[in-house]
Amino acid sequence: MYIKKLIYFLRNFLKIKPLIYNYPINKYASVSDSFFYRNDFIKTVFFLSNIASHTNPQIKQKDFVKIYIFSNTGEFLKVLNFTLKPFETKKIIFSDLNLKSNYGSFYVFHNFNENELLVKNKSFVTERGYLGFSDNSIFWNFVHGNHNSAYLSKKNKIKSLMTMSFFINEYFPQLTFNDCDKFDLVFTNSENMNVKYRIKTYDSENKIIDDKKFKLNSFNTTKASFENNDKKIKFVKIFSKMYFPRPVIFKYYSKYFDVLHG
């Protein structure tokens, strides 16, 4: 087991075939996906549940939750604190939070007293919940968080779990885009360093239509938008030293939209 951990450490440290994610240093750490919110013509809701009741249902205990919210430019906006009773779920409506940013990211960290069962099984309290997006507040599209992105340290500092590679990686979303009028690719950087991305779009004959380059600073979020009224864009490829540069994707149609992971 020690040799295996050493190999994993060296792979991540040297950035040669690293794991998709690092492990938290603290075995009691709380882990969160990176979540994307928006408050423009599309609204966002998040369902926050007492994870303690799901992991240890035989023990009735409170779940103490912190939600850290950032703007699209990486500015820390606010932290929300909740105490959830056993089996309680709250609906967080982002348009009610009076955020000064139309979109950005947030991280959800749980803490409860009786989590020795998780520690014993070398697991972590992890928030991988579902976000809802709607343009009419009636019909909602749901998608879970993107990546086991970060953990909360003992000093309440957000530490990234994402890994970088020494080489440029290529990511190919497993869907086509020539059925929609336009689409957005959403990326969030939870690293404490800048991350560069390159997006190439292709037609049905694999010819390049567009080539965009951009850089994300720490905790930045970007929406790379592409018009596709003529339906020429069929495929997308993403290039980055981020080992697993998977975006959240919004596809827009004439009367509705869809949201998913690539």
Image (spheres, grey):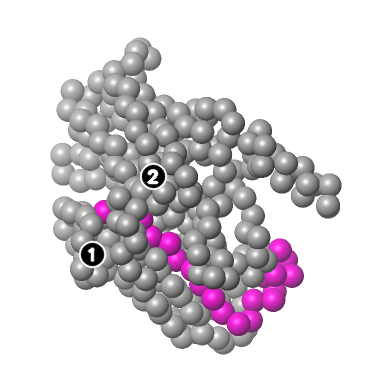
Looking at the picture, which amino acid does disc 1 mark?
Answer: Leu
Classed neighbour count for the residue bearing mark 2: other residues with Cα under 10 Å, few (<14), some (14–19), many (≥20): some
Q: Residue at x 63, y 36 (%)?
A: 15
* Residue 181 quadrant: top left
Looking at the picture, which amino acid does disc 2 mark?
Answer: Asn
Secondary structure beneath disc 2? loop
Residue 29 x, y percent position in the rendering: 60, 67
Quadrant in which the C terminus is drawn = top left
**What residue would you read off at disc 2?**
217
Q: Which mark is residue 182?
A: none
| Front residue of 149 and 61 | 149
Determine whether, in the image, residue 220 is placed left or right of residue 113: left
Classed neighbour count for the residue bearing mark 1: other residues with Cα under 10 Å, few (<14), some (14–19), many (≥20): some
Q: Does the stretch in magenta take in 88?
A: no
Q: Residue at x 38, y 14 (%)?
A: 206
Task: Tell how many labels.
Answer: 2
Secondary structure beneath disc 1? loop
Read off the magenta span. Answer: 103-122
Residue 163 x, y percent position in the rendering: 57, 43
Residue 181 visible at all:
yes
Determine whether, in the image, residue 149 is placed left or right of residue 8: left
